[in-house]
Image (spheres, grey):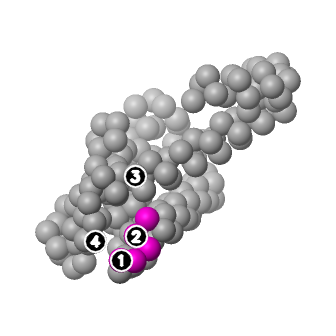
Amino acid sequence: MDFAGGAGLLDFPTIGPVVTAVVVLVAPLAGLAPLSLLTPRWLVAGVVLHLCAQLARGRGWHAVLCAAHPGAERPRRRDVILTWVAGAGASGVLSARGGDALKIVLMRRRMTTSCPTLVGTLAAETVAETALGVVLTGWALGAGLVPGLPRLGLGTGALLAAGVI
């Protein structure tokens, strides 16, 4: 199961798009969305945006890893991004934080670092993501952008967003 060139299951970096494709094909069969409502243009746009988001998040984790290991050899950006994408895809299949555990296992094989340090880098990324999510959710609630909810004040929207998250 060599990460760089092997053909092991954990090394398959495109599991996220594969899971997305399976969901798109299975959802209509499960009665979740009729296939006639799916337009190829929006489907392709969604997949492209999803892949761009995964690349951006992988690059962000690379920056956090480099900052957490200032004197050590920098991990290759490609390895970090592929690990991120594999972990994100596994998160869709495994329970709760299974994808994060996979990220730690794969990056531990590529770097000379400790598992607690890698967990800390993921925690740093998660805190920033949660803070941004609270701000954006509060803004959407305060601006009245959530269908079915009355327009709330910004303070009420922020409290509601913090409670939800």
Image quadrant for the C terminus?
top right
Residue kind at label 1, given as amino acid type:
Ala
What mark, if any, has residue 120 been given in the picture? Answer: 3
Residue assigned mark 1: 72
Q: CA distance from mark 2 to mark 1?
A: 5 Å
> Which of the two labelled residues, at mark 3 and mark 2, occupies the earlier sequence position?
2
Question: Image height check: is 97 above or below 6?
Answer: above
**Pair 4/1: label in front:** 1
Which residue occupies the foreground of this view, 74 or 94? 74
Is residue 86 rendered magenta in the image?
no
Residue kind at label 4, given as amino acid type:
Met
Q: Secondary structure at mark 2?
A: loop
Mark 2 and 1 residues: CB-CB less than 8 Å, in contact?
yes
Residue kind at label 3, given as amino acid type:
Gly
> Which of the two labelled residues, at mark 2 and mark 4, occupies the earlier sequence position?
2
Image quadrant for the N terminus?
bottom left
**Pair 2/4: label in front:** 2
Q: Secondary structure at mark 1?
A: loop
Answer left or right for 150 relative to 83. Answer: right
* Chief secondary structure of the magenta portion: loop
Determine the residue positioned at 17% across, 73% down: 2
Q: Quadrant of residue 45?
A: bottom right
Residue 80 lies, in percent from the top left, at: 39, 69
Q: Residues within 10 Å of mark 4 (few under 14, many from 20)?
A: some
Residue assigned mark 4: 111
> Which of the two labelled residues, at mark 3 and mark 4, occupies the earlier sequence position?
4
